[in-house]
Amino acid sequence: MLIFHGEKDSTVPLLQSQRLAAALKEKGATVELRVIAGAGHGFYKLGPEKVKELYRESIEFFKWTLHRAE
């Protein structure tokens, strides 16, 4: 599981994503938590280029994850 969390998220505390990641790892899941600098709850305010970068990172993570499952 790939978790993106905005550094400045005032809706969902970062601690919740940290706890989720830890609980999933404890159960043996592959988890990566990435804290996005300057981001709030939604990433759209970062601009289209940063959002595209996050999409690319997501795709690469899923490719890597699927490749490991083979």
Image (cartoon, grey):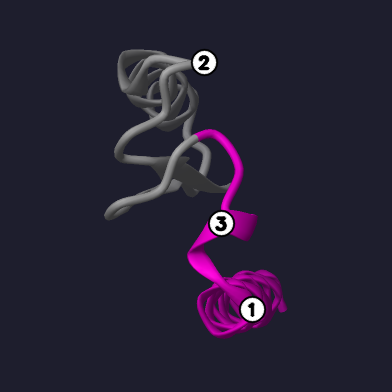
Which disc is residue 34 wearing? Answer: none
Q: Per the image, is 50 magenta?
A: yes
Marks 2 and 1 in Cβ contact (< 8 Å):
no
Q: Which residue is mark 3?
A: 45
* Residue sitting nearer the eye, 61 or 27: 61
Q: Residues within 10 Å of mark 2 (few under 14, many from 20)?
A: few
The location of residue 49, given as percent across then percent down, is 56, 85
Residue 17: quadrant of the picture:
top left
Query: Tag 3: residue type?
Result: Lys
User: For numbered disc 2, what is the local secondary structure?
Assistant: loop
Q: Which mark is residue 48?
A: 1
Q: Which mark is residue 11?
A: 2
Q: From mark 2 to mark 1, how far is it between C-alphas?
A: 22 Å
Range covered by the magenta-colored residues: 41-70
Q: Is residue 41 left or right of residue 63?
A: left
Q: CA distance from mark 2 to mark 3?
A: 15 Å
Residue 47 in percent (x, y) is at: 56, 72
Please, what secondary structure does the residue beneath circle 1 have?
A: helix
In-front residue for pair 51/1: 51
| 47 or 14: nearer the viewer | 47
